[in-house]
Image (spheres, rainbow, N blue to C red):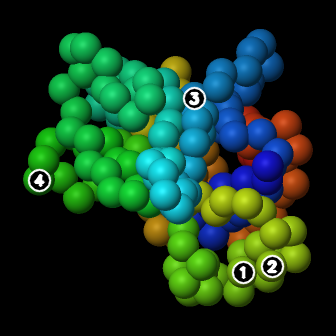
C-alpha cells in the first residue's frame, strides 16, 4: 500500500501509514492511519480511522485511539466518510488535528506539482493533514498552504518517505 500525505503544499509518499517526529535522541510516532475510506459493494464500508498522540497548542493532551478521544479529553470530534477532525469546541473552525482523504475530484484541484507527483507515483490513498499541535515540545502548524515545524516553514516539497513521514528539527527527512 502506498500513501500520499499532503502538508500544506508539500507531499510525502510512503509505504508506511505513519507520521513521526524525531530529534537527536528519539523518534515519536504521533499519527497512524489504521484504515482509509473504501466503499465495499454488498458489505460494510471501511471508514477513515486513525490513532494520534499529540498535545494542542494550548497544552491539552489529545489521545485518539481508533477515532475515539480517550477519557478525560475534552475535545470535539467531527467526522464524515472522508474526514476526521478534532477541535477545541463545537464552534471552532480551526482543528487541533484533521485528516482528510481526498477523492479523485479533489485531487485534481490541488497544486500542479502535487497532482503531477500523484499521477506519477499512483498512491492508493491521498491524505491531507491540517492542524495546530505539538509533539512533546515541538510545534507543528499546517493550514491550507502553510506548513511549519518549530517555526521553520516548508513549501512545494516532494519527499519519498519510504519508512513513514519523519519530521525533524532540521526539516523533513525520509
Q: What distance separates the C-alpha of mark 1 from that of mark 2?
A: 6 Å
Label of residue 86 in the image: none
Neighbour class for label 2 at 10 Å: few (<14), some, many (≥20)? few
Quickly name the residue at label 4: 91
Q: Residues within 10 Å of mark 3 (few under 14, many from 20)?
A: some
For the residues labelled 1 and 2, say whether their Cβ atoms are less than 8 Å apart.
Answer: yes
Number of numbered markers? 4
Return the disc, 3 or 1, that comes first in the chain's sequence: 3
The secondary structure type at the circle numbered 3 is strand
Which residue is depicted at the point 63% across and 69% down? 9
From this view, report whether residue 67 is shown above or below residue 13. above
Across and down, in percent, residue 153 comes to: 62, 57
- Looking at the image, is 81 positioned above or below residue 156? above
Mark closest to the chain's N terminus, 3 or 4: 3
Which of label 1 and label 2 is nearer to you? 2
Location of residue 75 (image quadrant): top left
Query: In terms of depth relative to the viewer, which is nearer, 14 or 141?
Result: 14
Which residue position is annotated with label 3?
30
Residue at image position (43%, 38%) is 133
Residue that badge 1 annotates: 115
In the image, residue 18 lies at what x, y percent? 68, 36
Mark 4 closeness class: few <14, some 14–19, many ≥20 residues within 10 Å = few
Q: Residues within 10 Å of mark 1 (few under 14, many from 20)?
A: some
Whether residue 151 is visible to the viewer of this picture, yes or no, is: no
Q: From the viewer's perspective, is 124 left or right of 105?
A: right
User: Above or below — where is 69 with respect to 35?
Assistant: above
Report how far apart the C-alphas of labels 2 and 4 lie in the structure: 37 Å
Mark 3 vs mark 4, CA separation in Å: 25 Å
Dot label at residue 119: 2
Q: What's the residue at 73%, 27% (across, down)?
A: 22
Amino acid at each position: 500500500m502506498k500513501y500520499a500525505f499532503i502538508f500544506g503544499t508539500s507531499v510525502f509518499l510512503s509505504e508506511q501509514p505513519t507520521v513521526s517526529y524525531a530529534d537527536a535522541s528519539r523518534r515519536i510516532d504521533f499519527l497512524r492511519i489504521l484504515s482509509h475510506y473504501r466503499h465495499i459493494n454488498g458489505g460494510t464500508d471501511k471508514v477513515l480511522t486513525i490513532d494520534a498522540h499529540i498535545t494542542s497548542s494550548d497544552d491539552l493532551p489529545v489521545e485518539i485511539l481508533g477515532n475515539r478521544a480517550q477519557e478525560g479529553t475534552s475535545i470535539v470530534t467531527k467526522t464524515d466518510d472522508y474526514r476526521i477532525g478534532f477541535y477545541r469546541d463545537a464552534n471552532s473552525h480551526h482543528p487541533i488535528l484533521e485528516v482528510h482523504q481526498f477523492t479523485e475530484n479533489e485531487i485534481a484541484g490541488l497544486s500542479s506539482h502535487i497532482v503531477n507527483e500523484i499521477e506519477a507515483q499512483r498512491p492508493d490513498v491521498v491524505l491531507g493533514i491540517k492542524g495546530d499541535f505539538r509533539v512533546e515540545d515541538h510545534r507543528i502548524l499546517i493550514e491550507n498552504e502553510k506548513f511549519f515545524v518549530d517555526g521553520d516553514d516548508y513549501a512545494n516539497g516532494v519527499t519519498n518517505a519510504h519508512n513513514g513521514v519523519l519530521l525533524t528539527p532540521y526539516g523533513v527527512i525520509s
